[in-house]
Amino acid sequence: MGLSPYWVDLHMHTVLSPCGELEMGAPEIAEAYRSAGIALCAVTDHNAADNAPAVAWAASGDPVVLAGMEVQSSEDIHVVVLFPDFDGAREYQRWLWEAMPPTQNRPDIFGDQLIIDGENSILDEQEILLIQGVGYSVDEVAQQAMDMGAIVIPAHLDRPSFSYEAGLGPVPSDFPCHALELSPAVSHADFRTWRERYPDRVFLRSSDAHRLSGISRDRCTVMMLEKPSFTEILLALANRDGRSVISPWGD
């Protein structure tokens, strides 16, 4: 097979995230990505991966669905971690939750945290507040994920809160990650500044969608792949075997 351009979105939320709208159910998400012509999406709820299987079931391969989460470190830095399968995501979540504070969610304040199946039946409600920092540093969060074969991406680097730059300043050259994420708000002119700051890093644009209207091609990234899959994305992030990331902002 040859290589083709595929649209991918490596950061979005479901009804498990308390900040996600209740419209972010599994069938609705799957249909939104199909309608937008986006071939692959990653389910990355806050500190949990429980709804990834539901979205994958609803999508039935279109789009391809990766399991992951948006981890909040002890420094309140958000890092997207993506796994090749659901078992890997669950194993990482077990490790992560060994350091999860016992703070309870207040649905009336923060929102519902619903675990669903592929038809939106509610299986459970997570009682521990998901939008809080775990007891691991950002370095520990990233290194553990790397050690478990995950893709690691510091999230929305351009934002004034919950980003590496906001919490600790510039991302060190030896920080363990595969790419840096910028939000859809970044302009072509802004991107030149980021490229100058991190000339050796790969940049991605992801939707960070919390509602269905946030799912669109102009909020994600194109990659040259043989097919939409975890392995192919890993190759593209490394610019190997012809696979590559096509910058949404140009060079």
Image (cartoon, rainbow, N blue to C red):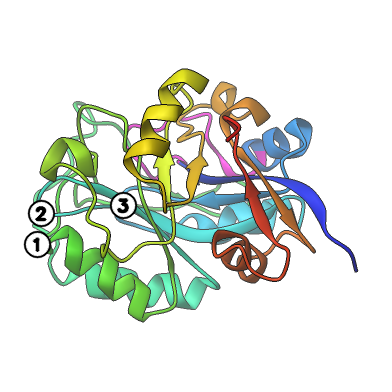
In the depicted structure, whether residue 200 falls above or below residue 84:
above
Q: Residue at x 23, y 68 (%)?
A: 96
Residue type, numbered disc 2: Ser
Q: Secondary structure at mark 3?
A: strand
Q: Position of residue 87 (x, y in %)?
A: 48, 77
Residue highlighted by disc 2: 74
Report if residue 12 is visible in the image: yes
Q: Is residue 104 magenta?
A: no
Residue type, numbered disc 3: Val
- Distance between the Cα atoms at labels 3 and 1? 14 Å
Residue highlighted by disc 1: 135
Residue highlighted by disc 3: 79
Q: Position of residue 230 (x, y in %)?
A: 61, 66
Q: Secondary structure at mark 2?
A: loop
Q: How many marks on residues?
A: 3
In the depicted structure, whether residue 250 falls above or below residue 121:
above
- Earlier-in-chain disc, 3 versus 2: 2
Q: Position of residue 106 (x, y in %)?
A: 17, 36
The picture quadrant where one finds residue 109 is: top left
The picture quadrant where one finds residue 217 is: top right
Q: Residue furthest right?
A: 1
- Earlier-in-chain disc, 1 versus 2: 2
The picture quadrant where one finds residue 61 is: bottom right
Q: Residue at x 15, y 41 (%)?
A: 169
Q: Nearer the viewer, residue 91 or 111?
A: 91
| Span shown in magenta | 13-27
Q: Residue at x 66, y 56 (%)?
A: 244
